[in-house]
Image (tube, grey):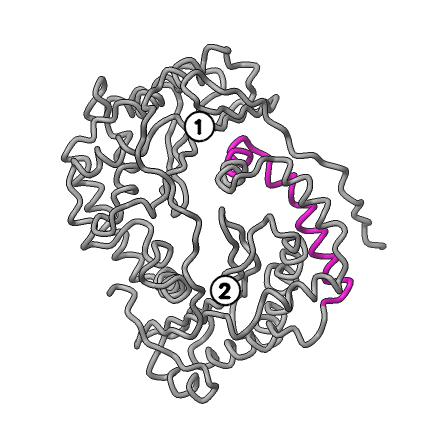
Amino acid sequence: MSRPVVPAPRPWIYPSPEVRVLPNGLTVWLFDLPGQHVATFDLLLPLPLSSEPRALEGVGTIALNSIDEGTVPHPDGRIAELLEAEGASLHGWAKQHHTRLGGQAPARRLGPVLELFTEVLREPAYADQDIAHHIETRIARHDTALASPGSANRLAFNRRLYGDDARLGRPAGGVPTTLGAICPDDVREWHRRGFGPAHATVIVAGDLSRVPTEAFDALGAWQNSQPTLAPPADDLPPHGTGTVLVDRPDAVQSTILVGLRSVPRTDPRWAAARLGGHAMAGAFASRLNLELRERLGYTYGIHGGFGAGPTHSLFTVGGSTRSEVTIDAVLRILDRLRLGEPFGAAEIEDAKRFLIGIAPLATETSADIVDQVAELRAAGLDTTFLKQHFAALATVEPDEATQVFQELVTPENLVISITGQAERFLPELEAAGLAPEVIDPAS
């Protein structure tokens, strides 16, 4: 019996939004998706965590997490009950470069839900007991992250890559000392100075034929025209390099993360970089996964590639290995990243088929659309970038992917972070000339 032939994907175009500007200056991007009866909405604020006072880091996260516990008209959880009665739920992220707050609701109920959402934005109660609860919860989450090898390793990686003096090098949610210093007035002040419609964007996706035009009137009436927390300059700290160890003396396996900071997605090399990163570590049949999982049995899987952020990208390779093969795995990763053998046509074609072919699957729901568009908007882009990017992916040749990968992934600029038996690894790393430093991510 012959194997079935998988046809080439049909041409696909990312949906374009209708753009409105409301009377208060708030920009609204509307994606009408017929048949998507669950609508997703997201407010994107140019409010980065780097605007937090260093002594109060985590205040942005606490303000976001506490915002829907109650409002002035509907305190003590009543606002959450009203949202739930409309079939709505809220979610949010306080990120290094921006803040997002949004939710989901039945499209036909979006009007009343947006009224309640605007109330949350305009008049959060920020009751003392709610803020205290979220501070306690965030401290517990920080402690849990330190207990997780993967999270501890990422904290160590970020610290070495960006440095202690950069906000990107410190935990986004703050640490116990800074969280413990936050009082309710600090949270209220963060909201007052940072939450406003000016320069903000609301992204809505769903079956908008079910949404009356006046559904956005409440958002247009939201006022705070003079928020005083301006986004800082996009200047990045110097790029850190080197090897760090997080000691886990009783660990039976190690967590590895290798990577560096790289070009933003607007760089003309971005398409070639993504393809090369996928061929190296992003696919099950990638070079590193075939080497370390399939051939050697060192790991359950290696993952990685180029991931874009608002101002720059990261190239990373990560995975977990048995303790006794950890350093050999690291050395093999470094050797493959030198790319002694150019990428072949089959590798790059496979990467193209995946990255281009998966695009429609990544936009199946209204939440998929909103999440992608919010991150594009945070980077100062719109959906036309995606059309250009997919076209660029299709034209990359293997020699271009090879050249770009060699330009961008330079072993001397890598950060290597390992969580595991530090005492065991130190001699091997020193013998390999990697000059490790043992650090405590809790300090």
Q: Disc 2 or 1, which lies upstream in sequence?
A: 1
Q: Quadrant of residue 297?
A: bottom right
The structure residue drawn at horizontal position 44% and vertical position 49%, both measured from the top left corner, is: 234
Res. 104 mark: 1
Res. 144 mark: none
Relative to 341, say whether 278 is above or below: above
Badge 1 density bin: few <14, some 14–19, many ≥20, Cα 10 Å: many
Quadrant where the C terminus is found in the figure: bottom left
Badge 2 density bin: few <14, some 14–19, many ≥20, Cα 10 Å: many
| Residue at disc 1, secondary structure | strand
The structure residue drawn at horizontal position 63% and vertical position 40%, both measured from the top left corner, is: 385
Give coordinates of residue 441: x percent, y percent: 30, 65
Q: Quadrant of residue 94?
A: top left
The structure residue drawn at horizontal position 49% and vertical position 28%, both measured from the top left corner, is: 203
Q: Which residues are magenta?
A: 343-371
| Residue at disc 2, secondary structure | strand
Residue placed most toward the observer, 295 or 306? 306
Per the image, the residue denoted by label 2 is 260
Label 2 vs label 1, nearer the camera: 2
Residue 214 magenta-highlighted: no
What residue type is disc 1 on?
Gln
Residue placed most toward the observer, 123 or 140? 123
Quadrant where the N terminus is found in the figure: bottom right
